[in-house]
């Protein structure tokens, strides 16, 4: 989005999507969202993201604390303390990647592009940054992962091979896009660094390549022909760009209808 009402910030839109906007700001922000298609799409994307996070983590927060932990601590309140810590962790992840200033809206990024970057960053932070990522498929064989993508996520594609750049495939995890299944592929580098590739198959617009960064985590995202890609990792921008170029090249070769002239670096 290339224009923004000078009285409405990105934080206002996030608070509006979360139902946390102060009453004295409500009329102004509502009017802006009604009159601005990109802002409306962005708010809807944030709402869908929040719903997906609640669906994923609310059951975890409601799980009883294992008896052995309760016995080890010998303190009954620990269950509530752990639940509160878990809730704060999830909320912190959401807030850390959603609280942007007005500059995000002034840089020309579309709502779809921002949502794609946010979703990939959250997925990487929640799942990939762990010592043992909780994957649905553990496999270093691209052919096996491609078969799994088609069967489970309805994503027909050749799994990118990044070994030439030092990254070995670990496997994948099913995720959720706007309305269709999505996937998160995980790679590991020579020094144990993790790289993730988020693939979403239900976008309605092309998105030019762009890199964003928050607290050391870089995300490069783009979309073409209804499919969005985001690569996330604790890497320099040049490294992210090189990885993105490798993935785009492989997708262009693998897909007969992929027009390389439309791929934007």
Image: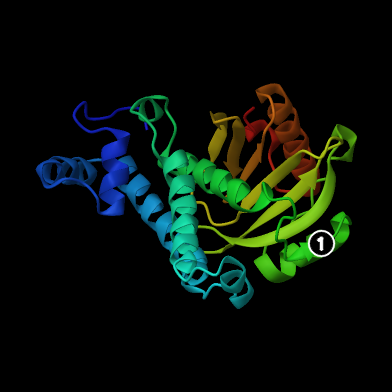
Decide if residue 55 is in sight here.
Answer: no
> Is 9 rendered above or below residue 169?
above
- Residue 168 is left or right of residue 93, and the answer is right
Examine the image and state in which quarter residue 172 appears.
bottom right
Q: Residue at x 60, y 69 (%)?
A: 69
Residue positioned most to the front: 74
Residue neighbourhood size for the residue with mark 1, other residues' Cα within 10 Å, grouped as few (<14), some (14–19), many (≥20)? some
Q: Residue at x 72, y 55 (%)?
A: 133
Q: Quadrant of the C terminus?
A: top right
Coordinates of residue 146 in the picture (x, y in percent): 79, 60
Number of marks in picture:
1
Examine the image and state in which quarter residue 104 appears.
top left
- Residue 217 is left or right of residue 169, and the answer is left
> Is 149 rendered above or below residue 158?
below
Coordinates of residue 111 in the picture (x, y in percent): 41, 41
> Is 139 rendered above or below residue 114?
below
Please tell me which residue lies in front, 138 or 114: 138
Coordinates of residue 230 in the picture (x, y in percent): 62, 42
Please tell me which residue lies in front, 139 or 192: 192
Q: Secondary structure at mark 1?
A: strand
Q: Residue at x 45, y 46 (%)?
A: 92
- Residue 177 is left or right of residue 255, and the answer is left
Q: Quadrant of the N terminus?
A: top left
Please tell me which residue lies in front, 163 or 39: 163
Coordinates of residue 124 in the picture (x, y in percent): 62, 47
Q: Which residue does the numbered mark 1 point to in the structure image?
A: 138
Decide if residue 259 is in sight here.
Answer: yes
């Amino acid at each position: 989005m290339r224009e923004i009402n000078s009285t409405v910030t990105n934080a206002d839109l996030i608070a509006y999507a979360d139902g946390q906007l102060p009453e004295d700001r409500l009329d102004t922000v509502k009017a802006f969202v009604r009159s601005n298609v990109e802002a409306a799409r962005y708010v809807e994307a944030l709402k869908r993201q929040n719903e997906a996070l609640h669906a994923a983590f609310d059951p975890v927060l409601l799980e009883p604390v294992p008896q052995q932990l309760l016995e080890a601590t010998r303190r009954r309140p620990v269950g509530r303390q752990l639940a509160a810590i878990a809730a704060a962790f999830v909320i912190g992840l959401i807030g850390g990647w959603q609280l942007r200033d007005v500059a995000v809206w002034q840089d020309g990024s579309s709502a779809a592009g921002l949502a794609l970057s946010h979703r990939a960053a959250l997925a990487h932070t929640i799942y990939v940054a762990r010592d043992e990522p909780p994957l649905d498929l553990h496999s270093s064989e691209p052919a096996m992962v491609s078969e799994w993508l088609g069967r489970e996520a309805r994503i027909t594609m050749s799994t990118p091979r990044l070994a030439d750049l030092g990254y070995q495939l670990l496997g994948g995890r099913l995720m959720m896009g706007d309305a269709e299944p999505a996937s998160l592929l995980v790679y590991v580098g020579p020094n144990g660094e993790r790289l993730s590739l988020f693939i979403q198959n239900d976008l309605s617009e092309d998105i030019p390549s762009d890199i964003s960064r928050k607290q050391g985590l870089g995300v490069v995202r783009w979309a073409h022909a209804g499919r969005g890609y985001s690569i996330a990792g604790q890497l320099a921008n040049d490294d992210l760009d090189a990885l993105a170029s490798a993935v785009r090249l492989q997708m262009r070769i693998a897909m007969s209808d992929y027009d390389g002239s439309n791929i934007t670096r």
